[in-house]
Image (tube, rainbow, N blue to C red):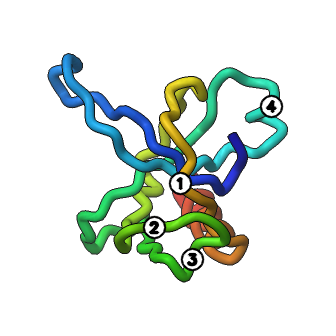
């Protein structure tokens, strides 16, 4: 699990009894990821809305893998998750896109 990778994870519904597999972007750095059982991530959605702490990415923003649809990175929805819950890696965002996401994340703090 490396920074800038997009992975698929089971996201629980509000009833906590069911889940759906959804993509998330790893934002924690590689040093943290190597030492911890967890990763820090932000979710992606294909529901595109104009919100201040989000950004849209598409296939052009990928350095590897394939993004099936343009997606919104919900930068203000940071969460920590156990790495073992990741179902699979679907790709990585490129450096320029990650820098834009990281800058928006820093704006929140």
The reply to whether callout 2 and callout 1 are in contact (CB within 8 Å) is yes
- Say if mark 2 contacts mark 3, CB within 8 Å: yes
The total number of labels drawn is 4
Q: Quadrant of residue 97?
A: bottom right
Tell me the number on the disc at residue 67.
2
Badge 2 local density, few (<14 within 10 Å), some, or many (20+)?
some
- Give the crowd class for mark 3: few <14, some 14-19, many >=20 residues within 10 Å: some
- Nearer the observer: mark 3 or 1; the answer is 1
Point out residue 21 in the picture as x, y percentages from the top left corner. Answer: 34, 39
Q: Pick whichever of labels 3 and 1 is earlier in the sequence.
A: 3
Question: According to the image, label 4 marks what residue?
Answer: 34
Cα distance between the residues tagged 2 and 1:
8 Å
Q: What element carries label 4?
A: helix
Tag in front: 1 or 4: 1
Q: How much space separates mark 3 and mark 1, taking CA atoms?
A: 13 Å
Which of the marked residues, 2 or 3, is nearer the chain's N terminus?
3
Secondary structure under the numbered disc 3 in the rendered image: helix
The structure residue drawn at horizontal position 57% and vertical position 47%, both measured from the top left corner, is 89
The residue that appears at 60% across and 47% down in the rendered structure is 26
1 or 4: tag closer to the N-terminus: 4
Q: Residue 77, image x and y in percent? A: 41, 47
Q: Name the residue under label 1.
A: 90
> Could you tell me how far apart the alpha carbons at marks 2 and 3 are, in whole angstroms?
9 Å
**Disc 3 marks which residue?**
61
Question: Does label 3 or label 4 sit earlier along the sequence?
Answer: 4
């Amino acid at each position: 699990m490396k920074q800038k990778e997009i992975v698929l994870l089971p996201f629980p519904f509000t009833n906590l009894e069911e889940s759906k597999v959804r993509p998330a972007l790893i934002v924690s750095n590689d040093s943290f990821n190597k030492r911890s059982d967890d990763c820090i991530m932000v979710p992606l959605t294909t529901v595109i809305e104009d919100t201040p702490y989000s950004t849209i990415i598409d296939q052009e923003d990928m350095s590897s893998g394939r993004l099936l649809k343009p997606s919104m990175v919900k930068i203000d929805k940071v969460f920590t998750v156990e790495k073992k819950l990741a179902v699979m890696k679907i790709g990585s965002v490129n450096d320029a896109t990650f820098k834009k996401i990281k800058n928006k994340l820093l704006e929140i703090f």
